[in-house]
Image (cartoon, helix red, strand yellow):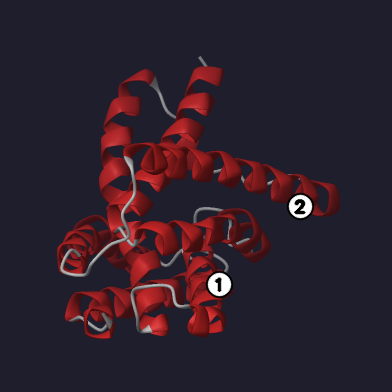
Amino acid sequence: MERLARSKSITIAALITFLMVGIEIVQAINGKPIPSAANLSGILIIFVLPILFLIINRTLKKAPKPYLTKKQKILLVVDTILLELFITLFFAGVYTSLAGDLQDNPGLELSDGEYIFTMILLAWQLLGEEAMKISIFLFIYKDISYKQEKNKQYVIAWLISVTVFGLMHLSTYGFNFVHCILIIGLPTILYAIVWAISEKPLYMWLIHFLYDFFIFSIVFLGVQ
């Protein structure tokens, strides 16, 4: 199990993620996007990391997984989405009461002709985002399964993973560190529970996609 957590695909994905978050932080310090750096990140998230996700998923299939009934699988997905939405709204409320309006995501502004294409692209891109999240966790935790005796390491690894995930959105949300960590990153700490229960990358991707699909669709229908 520990050997699988140190596989080449996981290590490469983690190093790429650290590189990309470094790019985001440098751009934040610069105060504006750096075209060449932004282009590199775009190539990595669209072309490289989704492929690494598929490789990681295939690699981790070799490890035994917890058994879940069909009902448990459905409840895991639905409950996580609803709880993540609640936590995000709570943090958003706290943020707006203390710091004012949230940063808008320009990607939510879609025309009729863009919606379907964007959803297809989103599904593919989120494979890359989950490769980042999972690889950072496994790279730090150095194991696959949750173990009671490693509870502290498990929590720390996931906190680092979701913080990095939040910081990956700096350029999307106007280089607002608090917004990215509090509203984008921290609510996904729920994925630590999902992983402990399932240990399946595809569940992580499915929850992430359905959550974003719901948000995009609500905004899209609301502006029609």
The residue furthest right is: 98
Q: Is residue 199 left or right of residue 101?
A: left
Query: Residue 195, percent across and down?
Result: 41, 61
Q: Is residue 59 left or right of residue 144?
A: left
On screen, residue 158 above or below 172 = below
Mark 2 or mark 1, earlier in chain: 2
Foreground mark, 2 or 1? 1
The residue furthest top is: 224
Amino acid marked by disc 2: Tyr
* Quadrant of residue 181 within the rendered picture: bottom right
* Quadrant of residue 134 within the rendered picture: bottom left
| Residue with the mark numbered 2 | 95
On screen, residue 20 above or below 72 = below
Q: Quadrant of the N terminus?
A: bottom left
Query: Residue 129, percent across and down?
Result: 36, 58
Amino acid marked by disc 1: Leu
Query: Residue 126, percent across and down?
Result: 33, 51
* Quadrant of residue 60 within the rendered picture: bottom left
On screen, residue 209 above or below 29 = above
Categorize mark 1 by other alpha carbons within 10 Å: few (<14), some (14-19), many (20+). Answer: some
On screen, residue 13 above or below 170 = below
Q: Is residue 100 shown to the viewer in this render? A: no
Q: Residue at x 49, y 63 (%)?
A: 192
Q: Residue at x 53, y 57 (%)?
A: 190
Mark count: 2
| Residue with the mark numbered 1 | 159
Query: Residue 34, percent across and down?
Result: 42, 67
